[in-house]
Amino acid sequence: MSLNTPFPIDVVVMAAGKGTRMKSRLPKVLQRLAGVPLVQHVINTAAQLNARSAVVITGHGAEQVEPVLLAPGQALAVQCVRQEPQLGTGHAVQQAVPALADDGVVVILSGDVPLTQADTLQALIAQCGGDKLALLTIDFADPTGYGRIVRSAQGQGQSDAVQAIVEHKDASDAQRQISEVYSGIMAVPAQWLKRWLGRIDNQNAQGEYYLTDVVKLAVADGVPVVAHKIDDALQVAGINSPVQLAELERAHQLRQAHRLMTQGVRLQDPARFDLRGQLDCAQDVEIDVNCVFEGRVALGEGVRIGANCVIANCTIAAGAVIHPFTHIDGEKLGVSVGEGALIGPFARLRPGAQLGAEVHIGNFVEVKNSTMAQGAKANHLAYLGDATVGERVNYGAGSITANYDGANKHRTVIEADVHIGSNCVLVAPVTIGAGGTVGGGSTITKSTEPGALSVARGKQISIANWARPQKKPKP
Ligand code: UD1
Ligand code: MG
């Protein structure tokens, strides 16, 4: 039930079209913008309208599109209705009629128009008011290809009543001069919509059932038609080709970058910034060029991110520095980086890495499902998996936890103040007692006592004055 309108909202999303110009095996509405399928953007926006129901019209690639829409955890309960064959937008919406109640306002959206904002749709719904036909329109300098908004005889003033939408291919030369176009988005009382859909024919240039013909039917029935005109072209931009997809991606990224900069985030170059999820930044965050943020990322005060980092599902506390070329992906478990930590360059933090304050992770170090307490360091060429690392531990270059025995994973515990030398193998399950030292090159298979030096490698022998073999003289 809609919370802020006196009538329920039902959403219909048209997503049956082929998308020939994408030249892709993936249906057009599943192509990704900012990492999210186009149709999912539309569903996410619909969810913000507190819609009572959502019907998606599928057709081309339905067997790929429907599982995405019906996946658990979907933002809004979605019903899929197939349209086969595709005989036009009017025919598409007709397929939804059995699923639509009579008492609602139907908001019609397109699965390939991803960036419409919820507040724009709220304003459109308000214009509809439960008893009018409301069209979302925009002025285009080049309106070629779009349906034109034809207003009453006087001219094209905003106050002149909307008479019809005429598709480009059906328009006269005079009508083609009209710059106001239909966005493809409308809000319409369900009862009227159902009545009009039954009366649409396909006597037009394309031989299709045009949804846009409801406008003249509304006029004939004396139902007021109102246009809600916006000037933000991104909100009505549809995707038909890889070029348009890339252009909209850039425009969207630039908009996100500007929003962050308005909040005080310092982006080295807003044109080289990609956010495919949600990024929350405290004060004085600095982000260098070519970074990609995915999923949910939170950056604390004064965090600095070096160039060319990919950071997903991660919380980074105040004052931490992520040096260039670091890859962090928390996936479902998440990653946390403590205050003042120094990470990278060329570090890799995987799911379940929980790093305390002042931890240092250097180049070519991988950390997975491990906690590192305050001040612990692993500065070069190392692996920590399924490990619990105490405060101030120094973990030497080239050392690894052997956490996997081929069947199961086991934990390594390294207690506080331990020093692990270079090139050690800690075969889990194993515990290195507090304050202990492990000599370089050791393979440790048994737990060690606190304070002990443990060395597990061939003992060094030296043979004095040893003569190397000589080449035999040629005969
Ligand atoms: C439509 C409008 C036009 C408007 C333009 C805005 C009509 C007749 N015209 O034109 O006034 O200016 O959008 O972009 O509506 N679809 C189906 N089944 C079909 C046909 C289309 O599901 O049988 C879907 C498409 O996948 C797409 C949407 O409906 O998501 C719009 O269809 P499209 O063919 O792009 O309509 P346009 O010709 O662009
Ligand atoms: Mg189109």
Image (spheres, rainbow, N blue to C red):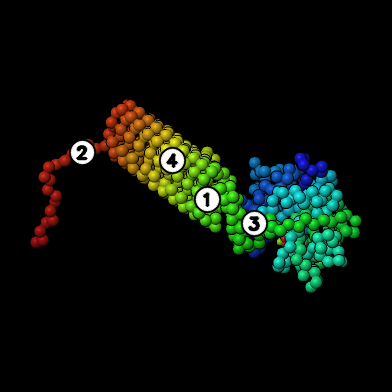
> What amino acid is labelled 4 in the image?
Ala
Crowd tier of the residue under label 3, counting other residues whose Cα lies within 10 Å: few below 14, some 14–19, many 20 or above: many
Residue topped by disc 4:
341
- From the viewer's perspective, tell me whether residue 218 is left or right of residue 243: right
> What amino acid is labelled 2 in the image?
Gln
The tag earlier along the polypeptide, 3 or 2, is 3
Residue topped by disc 1:
266
The tag earlier along the polypeptide, 2 or 1, is 1
> What amino acid is labelled 3 in the image?
Pro
Indicate the position of residue 121 as horizontal and vertical percent values.
74, 50
Residue topped by disc 2:
460
Residue extending furthest top?
449
Element carrying mark 3: loop
Position of the N terminus by quadrant: top right
Q: Give the label, 2 or 4, closer to the camera.
A: 4
The tag earlier along the polypeptide, 1 or 3, is 3
Q: Give the label, 1 or 4, closer to the camera.
A: 1
* x 50%, y 54%: residue: 268
